[in-house]
Image (cartoon, grey):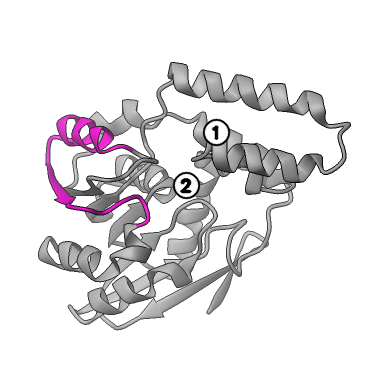
Amino acid sequence: MQVNINGVKTNYLSFGQGKPFIILHGWGSASDRWIIEAEAIAKQGHRVIVPDMPGFGESDKLTAPWRVNDYLKWFEDFTSELKIESFTLLGYSFGGAVAAKVAVKYPQRVEKLFLVASAVIRNKTAKKDASAGFAKFIKLFQFLPFYLLFRKAVYKFIIRKSDYVYTEGVMKETYLNVISDDVSYKLGFIKVPTVIIWGDKDQSVPVEDARVINEKVKNSKLVIIPGADHLMHKRLPEALAEKIIENL
């Protein structure tokens, strides 16, 4: 299914009927990565809606860099277009940053919030500074043949955990905008019931972040999935769906 949101074609999947349950995917992902979870949740009497956020999946590519607040505005217009007033909202990784801002701005609309391995804490660390410095260093070798292949190898095997090298065009600046937006200072303003789901083996967004979120969001519950890493929605979709359903 597709809708036009202010000139941006937005693709989305829809499952079941009932109370709206919206899932926001992570960076570099798309709606089709959440089919197993969506189908399971739909069986509980929900209409599950999983959009491809602009710049991802089958939705339109961006023509200019966006910030998290641009995705927030897109979400507002998307739900308005679908005539959805209230909903349960799940945000995974990058989608969690958008979901957290939605919950802060529209507490009267969000019935329950699920933050799954959500990248809402963007504290500047020595490790990040070192990675950024190393990234600048390798740019000095742009004159070399096969530079792009070399750069990808460096990010994959040395820096790791960064999606920057896999982005193209305006998405590179969008990515930098997103990772510079620390949503953690807004967590204390989240008043809606919140369920925080994390894997104890997550190396991309460490489980320590989940505990910080749990502490800052007063009306929250922390659920840890043993053995799960950041890609739990792909590697352990049934286990993740089970935890979501238990906390609906």
Q: CA distance from mark 2 to mark 1?
A: 30 Å
- Which of 237 and 160 lies nearest the eye of the viewer? 160
Residue 177 percent coordinates (x, y) = 58, 34
Q: Is residue 9 above or below residue 197?
A: below
Question: Which is nearer the N-term, disc 2 or disc 1?
Answer: 2
**Which residue is located at x 62 percent, y 19 percent?**
133
Q: Amino acid at mark 2?
A: Leu
Q: Which residue is mark 2?
A: 72
Quarter of the image for residue 21 reads bottom left
Determine crowd level at label 1: few under 14, some 14-19, many 20+ residues with C-alpha closer than 10 A.
some
Residue 183 percent coordinates (x, y) = 38, 32
Report the quarter where the C terminus lies: bottom left
Residue 135 percent coordinates (x, y) = 65, 27
Reply yes or no: does residue 81 show up in magenta.
no
Determine crowd level at label 2: few under 14, some 14-19, many 20+ residues with C-alpha closer than 10 A.
some
Quarter of the image for residue 246 reads bottom left
Secondary structure state at the residue bearing disc 2: helix
Reply yes or no: does residue 218 show up in magenta.
yes
**Which residue is located at x 35 percent, y 80 percent?**
15
- Nearest to the eye among marks 2 and 1: give it: 1
- Which of 219 and 148 lies nearest the eye of the viewer? 148
Residue 179 percent coordinates (x, y) = 51, 34
Instruction: Left or right? Give the position of 133 relative to 229.
Output: right
**Which residue is located at x 43 percent, y 19 percent?**
125
Q: Which residue is mark 1?
A: 159
Q: Which residues are magenta?
A: 206-231
- Which of 163 and 42 lies nearest the eye of the viewer? 163
- Mark number, residue 133: none
Residue reaching furthest top? Answer: 126
Secondary structure state at the residue bearing disc 1: helix
